[in-house]
Amino acid sequence: MTRLTESAIEDFAIKLFERLGYDYIHAPDIAPDGVAPERSRYDEVLLVGRLEAALKRINPKLSPALQQAALKEVQRISSPDLLANNEAFHRLLTEGVPVIASTSCAGYLATSACLAVIVKTAAFSESSAMALETGNPL
């Protein structure tokens, strides 16, 4: 009986993705000390340059600010549980990354923090809008 090994599964997956049009890149080639590094440390899981390029290619009409907000949301996944991280990342890939577009708030450009404040409190002064815009406390 033939024994199924991790190497056999990996080879099968690589060939499958290549047939689907993906390029295979040997991991040591893009390592920090590789011939074409795409990360500065071994513990960097995301290839941020590739992710940014994909965000721009897939969402050409999305503003650069919203693209960056989506990237930050993906980078924010940080559970100590590997399975929880994988599930959260998969959910973002399949369902999309929720980002909040800017809107006007008491005459000032509003951030998602401003929108959250409006929902929680009925009163919203110009000074609190300025504090939220600049990130400075009141």
Image (cartoon, rainbow, N blue to C red):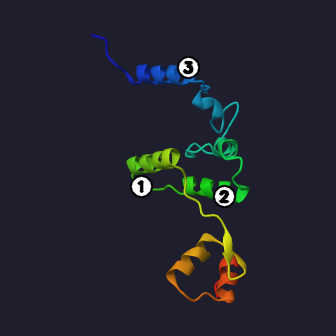
Nearer-the-camera pick, 44 or 114? 114
In the rendered view of the protein, which quadrant contains the N terminus?
top left
In this figure, which residue is indicated by the disc labeled 2? 66
User: For the residue marked with disc 3, what is the amino acid?
Assistant: Arg
User: For the residue marked with disc 1, what is the amino acid?
Assistant: Pro
Residue 116, compared with residue 74, is above or below; it is below
In this figure, which residue is indicated by the disc labeled 3? 19
Distance in Å between CA atoms under marks 2 and 3:
33 Å
Report if residue 79 is visible in the image.
yes
Q: Is residue 136 left or right of residue 116?
A: right
Please identify the residue farthest to the top as the structure is shown.
1
In the rendered view of the protein, which quadrant contains the C terminus?
bottom right
Report if residue 40 is visible in the image.
no
* x 68%, y 44%: residue: 49
In this figure, which residue is indicated by the disc labeled 1? 80
Q: Is residue 136 left or right of residue 120?
A: right
The label nearer to you, 1 versus 2, is: 2
Residue 22, compared with residue 85, is above or below; it is above
